[in-house]
Amino acid sequence: MNERNNRFRLIWASTLCASGLTLLFTSLWMPPQGVIDSSVLVAYGEVMTFVGGLVGIDYVYRNKGQ
């Protein structure tokens, strides 16, 4: 069960980082089609990237001794 949980955390961290970076790069090149300001997209992308980084760091340190 622990190996399955660790694998899920690694996939979740990678997905969050990739999604956050995609939003950050998208907000630089594409103006929003609706009422969403580009600063909202940038902030959300930064938060997703930061959370993905934290989950990834947690994964590394939990499995460091194994």
Image: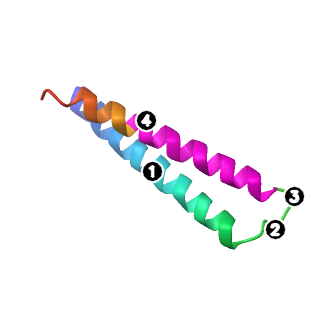
Q: What secondary structure is marked by label 4?
A: helix
Numbered tag placed on residue 35 in the rendering: 3
Residue 15: image x %, image y %? Answer: 45, 50
Given residues 33 and 38, the one toward you in this image is 38
Quadrant of the image containing the C terminus:
top left
- The secondary structure type at the circle numbered 2 is loop
Residue range in magenta is: 37-55
Q: CA distance from mark 4 to mark 1?
A: 13 Å
Give the percent coordinates (x, y) of residue 17.
Answer: 47, 50
Residue 2 left/right relative to 26: left
Q: Position of residue 12 (x, y in %)?
A: 42, 43
Q: Tell me which amino acid carries mark 2.
A: Gln
Q: Which residue occupies the extreme bottom position in the image?
A: 29
Q: CA distance from mark 3 to mark 1?
A: 26 Å
In-image side of 23 versus 57 (left or right): right
Disc number lying in front (4 or 1): 4
Q: Residue at x 49, y 47 (%)?
A: 16
Q: Is 1 covered by the magenta stretch?
A: no
Give the label on residue 33, or none: 2
**Horizontally, is 26 left or right of 32 in the view?**
left
Which residue, given by chain and number where applicable, does mark 4 sit on? Answer: 54
Question: Looking at the picture, does residue 49 appear above or below residue 25?
Answer: above
The residue beneath circle 1 is 15
Mark 2 or mark 4: which is in front? 4
Mark 1 Cα-neighbour bin, 10 Å: few <14, some 14–19, many ≥20: some
Marks 1 and 2 sit apart, C-alpha to C-alpha, by 25 Å
Spatial CA distance of label 4 from label 3 is 30 Å
Residue 1 seen in render = no
When asked about the image quadrant of residue 64, the answer is: top left
Write the residue at 81% across / 68% down.
33
